[in-house]
Image: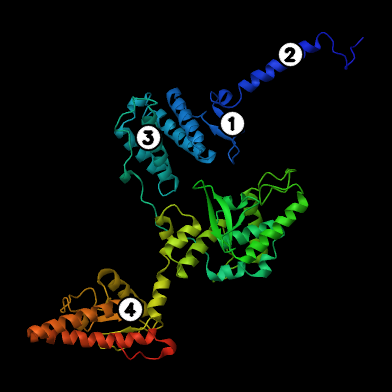
């Protein structure tokens, strides 16, 4: 007769004890204890949630290299490096391992990895990946691997000559930012097109990308309480810059704050107990803790662009990536004369070199200022530069070249750079000298210095010195008088040149 399921028969406690022992043993073997020896690491078993689910070591045939690759990957993950980056580094070591195992190379020990071998590796890389972005990556990651071996003392047999130099890296193509044209942005920012979004959350993501310049991964992971205010009550968007691993703030306007507040109210209707993220995944997310995936937004964005029928200046359908909104904001700010340091802080760049990438497009801003400024020569006569003239581009290039190669403290030289100057140290008497109102402080200071020189020379009876400086002083007076017209209110002239 079968035992009653509710009864605790003599075998039941023994079964429960055995199950408990297995559970305890399993818990002891979880995490690194269970995963480290595997050739395929399951990142979820390590408590790591990432786009990549595994790190693969199964294609590294050398046991000694596989062990070093695992130590490197575990150390990198323990420092907080993203799983994608750790997996990418392991793929580089896999390529290197297969290179070492090839019949033409046949390296079986770490002490054989010297500089001549790396030069053969560089030649192989060039044959396989020349012209591709991964070319630099495969050199840089392997160099970091060698550095970690030496830094942590994992294997002292690595030769000192096993190192890559700066010249080993292929030159990076200096490309302009992929900013969208104003023709395209005008269409994308139009309210009728923004209203074509079927999902209001995706519409808000688009507004944040356009106006704040966040990366898409940072945007979809925004916390629910992402708005903070300063002492004056101005709103800021608080987010985690995952690339730099730090929190950052970016100013927003009241309209965007209102859009975010409306979205937060919709979230409360769906998740009354609250959700920690601003853009929770709509499906399989009962508690609202899981953020949406950026690839979901990319797919929806592609459909939105198709519905909007956005076209460029030539009538062609445009292809837009979320990151181009970041490029567009940076370029717009630079061309609106926002200081480069302010742009760096808004985009939360780690170095000025990254922001300078956008400043390369500011030539239009400089040209606009040059065309708008009042330019005068040494006689105070206006110098015109027709922006629509047949030689406008050439004239602008000459002015730019003059700024770079013949910069002066109080103006610019208009002499072609191919010629030598016959008026050395006497630019204020040179017919090729051109200046603008931005140099008025220098002109006024120089005028005061000239007055002192002339007075001292007159007192000493140095008539030649007086004569030379009187000519410069006269030219300077005419320059100041002409340029002060720009500074006077309502266009009225200023009578006192001093």
The tag earlier along the polypeptide, 3 or 2, is 2
The tag earlier along the polypeptide, 4 or 3, is 3
- For this orientation, the residue located farthest to the left is 461
Name the element at disc 1: helix
Q: Which residue is under mark 2?
A: 17
The one nearer the camera, 33 or 169, is 33
Name the element at disc 3: helix
Whether pointer 3 and pointer 1 mark residues with C-beta atoms closer than 8 Å, the reply is no
Return the x and y of residue 471 as percentages of the image width and height: 17, 87
Q: Quadrant of the C terminus?
A: bottom left
Name the element at disc 4: helix
Whether pointer 1 and pointer 2 mark residues with C-beta atoms closer than 8 Å, the reply is no
16 up-or-down from 283: above or below? above
- For this orientation, the residue located farthest to the front is 459
The tag earlier along the polypeptide, 4 or 1, is 1
Return the x and y of residue 336 as percentages of the image width and height: 47, 70
Q: Which residue is under mark 4?
A: 395
148 up-or-down from 378: above or below? above
The tag earlier along the polypeptide, 4 or 2, is 2
The tag earlier along the polypeptide, 3 or 1, is 1
Q: Which residue is under mark 3?
A: 147
Q: Residue at x 43, y 61 (%)?
A: 341
- Residue 136 placement: quadrant: top left
């Amino acid at each position: 007769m079968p035992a009653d399921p509710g009864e605790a028969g003599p075998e039941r406690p023994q079964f429960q004890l055995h199950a408990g022992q297995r559970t305890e043993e399993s818990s002891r073997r979880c995490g690194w204890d269970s995963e480290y020896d595997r050739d395929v690491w399951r990142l979820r078993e390590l408590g790591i949630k990432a786009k990549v689910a595994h790190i693969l070591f199964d294609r590294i045939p050398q046991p000694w290299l596989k062990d070093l690759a695992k130590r490197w990957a575990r150390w990198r993950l323990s420092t907080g490096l993203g799983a994608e980056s750790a997996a990418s580094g392991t793929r580089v070591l896999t390529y290197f391992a297969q290179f070492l195992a090839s019949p033409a190379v046949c390296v079986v020990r770490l002490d054989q990895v010297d500089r001549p071998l790396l030069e053969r590796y560089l030649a192989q890389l060039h044959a396989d990946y020349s012209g591709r972005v991964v070319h630099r990556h495969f050199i840089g990651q392997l160099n970091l691997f060698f550095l970690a071996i030496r830094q942590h003392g994992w294997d002292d047999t690595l030769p000192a000559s096993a190192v890559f130099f700066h010249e080993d890296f292929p030159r990076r193509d200096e490309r302009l930012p992929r900013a969208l044209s104003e023709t395209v942005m005008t269409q994308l920012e139009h309210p009728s097109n923004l209203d074509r979004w079927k999902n209001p959350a995706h519409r808000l993501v688009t507004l944040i990308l356009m106006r704040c310049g966040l990366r898409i991964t940072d945007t979809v992971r925004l916390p629910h309480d992402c708005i903070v205010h300063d002492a004056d009550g101005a709103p800021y968007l608080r987010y985690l810059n995952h690339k730099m691993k730090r929190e950052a703030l970016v100013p927003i306007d009241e309209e965007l704050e209102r859009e975010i507040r409306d979205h937060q109210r919709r979230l409360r209707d769906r998740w009354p107990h609250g959700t920690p993220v601003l853009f929770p995944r709509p499906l399989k997310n009962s508690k609202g803790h899981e953020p949406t995936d950026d690839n979901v937004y990319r797919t929806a964005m592609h459909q939105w662009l198709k519905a909007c029928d956005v076209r460029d200046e030539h009538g062609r359908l445009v292809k837009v990536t979320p990151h181009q909104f970041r490029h567009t904001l940076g370029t717009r700010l630079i061309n609106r004369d926002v200081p480069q340091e302010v742009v760096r802080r808004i985009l939360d760049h780690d170095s000025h070199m990254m922001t300078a990438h956008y400043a390369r497009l500011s030539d239009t801003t400089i040209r606009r200022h040059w065309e708008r400024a009042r330019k005068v020569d040494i006689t105070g006569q206006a110098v015109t530069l027709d922006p629509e003239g047949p030689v406008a581009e050439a004239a602008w290039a000459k002015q730019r070249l003059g700024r770079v190669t013949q910069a002066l403290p109080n103006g610019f030289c208009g002499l072609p750079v191919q010629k030598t100057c016959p008026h050395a140290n006497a630019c204020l008497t040179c017919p090729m000298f051109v200046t603008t109102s931005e140099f008025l402080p220098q002109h006024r200071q120089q005028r005061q210095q000239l007055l002192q020189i002339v007075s001292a020379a007159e007192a000493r009876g140095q008539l030649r010195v007086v004569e030379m400086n009187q000519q410069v002083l006269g030219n300077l007076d005419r320059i100041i008088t002409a340029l002060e017209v720009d500074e006077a209110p309502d266009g009225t002239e200023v009578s006192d040149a001093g």
